[in-house]
Image: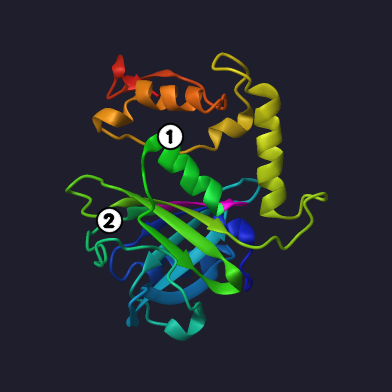
């Protein structure tokens, strides 16, 4: 695997403990798992600190995983990418002895629509908006996590000019259009059909008063947005109002 695909913008990134990236790479190589090896500046304002990552795809699935570190014994084996692949909001790298989530990334067809939706429905502004290679644009929303984790959990959306045909299903733009058309057809109200693509979703918790489920639903209804379903779930093993999503 030597070429980056826009479909890799759909990925979950994890930070690996010190010295372990090479161990993962050796295990993948031994099992014949194809990986894309990238090196990139860890920070936008510091080109001296380099991060390294491995990207792989689980066959017959939509799951793409990227693990990152700032250490490797073989830096020359990693393809140079000129822009950071993660926004370290605190300007510090994780130091824990176990793997940590960094971000969930999604490819999108219109960055402005994403920014507008987060502002209008969730009342959240981007933490950063970055321009990258090939006229790509990445917008990042950072959500505070636990003190034990020590850094924010990011959601990032990546726009790239279409590189395939929408009509033939060869681009991420086509995929988004397909998902939206399915939702428009079947998710007509909060009790209508839940499409299987709905399982490909993010889960957020925001304890702010104006971010309650009722407030979010009110904003969705006010904007005529029917593409949502309320669920009564389980949190920490107990049913209750905190389990509503």
Q: Residue at x 44, y 19 (%)?
A: 231
- Crowdedness near tag 2: few (<14), some (14–19) or many (≥20) residues, C-alpha within 10 Å: few
User: Residue under circle 1?
Assistant: 121
Viewer-proximal residue, 206 or 194?
206
Residue 46 shown left or right of residue 222 in the figure: left
Residue 193 is left or right of residue 56, and the answer is right
Residue 53 location, quadrant: bottom left
Q: How is the image coloured?
A: rainbow
Question: The residue tagged with tag 2: helix, strand or loop?
Answer: loop
The image position of residue 222, as x and y in percent, is: 49, 24
Q: Position of residue 18 (x, y in %)?
A: 28, 68
Vertical comparison of 173 with 177: above or below = below
Residue 39 located left or right of residue 215:
right
Residue 109 on the magenta segment:
yes
Res 15 quadrant in image: bottom left
- Residue depicted at 33% across the width and 21% down the height: 243
**Magenta stretch bounds:** 103-110
Q: Earlier in the sequence, mark 2 or mark 1?
A: 2
Dominant secondary structure, magenta:
strand
Q: Secondary structure at mark 1?
A: helix
Q: Is residue 128 magenta?
A: no
- Is residue 12 positioned above or below 233 on the image? below
* Residue at 52%, 25% in the rendered image: 228
Can residue 203 be seen in this snapshot?
Answer: no
Q: Which residue is mark 2?
A: 98
Where, quadrant-wise, is the C terminus in this rendering? top left
Which dot, 2 or 1, sits closer to the camera?
A: 1
Using the image, determine if residue 211 lies above or below residue 118. Answer: above
Looking at the image, residue 59 lies above or below residue 95:
above
Observer-nearest of 64 and 176 = 176
| Circle on res. 26 | none
């Amino acid at each position: 695997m030597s070429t980056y695909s826009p479909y890799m913008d759909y990925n979950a990134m994890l930070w690996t403990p010190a010295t372990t990236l090479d161990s993962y790479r050796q295990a993948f190589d031994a099992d014949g798992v194809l990986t894309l090896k990238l090196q990139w500046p860890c920070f936008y304002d510091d080109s001296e600190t380099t991060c390294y990552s491995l990207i792989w795809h689980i066959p017959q699935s939509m799951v793409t995983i990227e693990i990152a570190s700032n250490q490797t014994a073989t830096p020359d084996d990693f393809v140079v990418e000129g822009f950071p692949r993660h926004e370290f909001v605190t300007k510090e790298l994780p130091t824990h002895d176990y793997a940590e989530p960094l971000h969930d990334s999604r490819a999108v067809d219109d960055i402005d629509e994403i920014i507008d939706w987060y502002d209008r429905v969730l009342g959240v502004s981007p933490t950063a908006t970055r321009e990258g290679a090939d006229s790509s644009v990445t917008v990042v929303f950072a959500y505070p996590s636990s003190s034990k984790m020590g850094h924010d959990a990011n959601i990032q959306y990546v726009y790239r000019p279409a590189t395939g045909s929408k009509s033939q299903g060869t681009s991420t733009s086509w995929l988004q259009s397909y998902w939206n058309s399915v939702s428009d057809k079947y998710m007509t109200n909060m009790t209508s059909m839940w499409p299987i693509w709905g399982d490909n979703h993010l889960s957020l918790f925001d304890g702010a008063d104006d971010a309650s489920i009722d407030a979010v639903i009110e904003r969705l209804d006010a904007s005529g947005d029917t593409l949502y379903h309320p669920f009564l779930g389980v949190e920490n093993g107990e049913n209750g109002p905190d389990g509503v999503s």
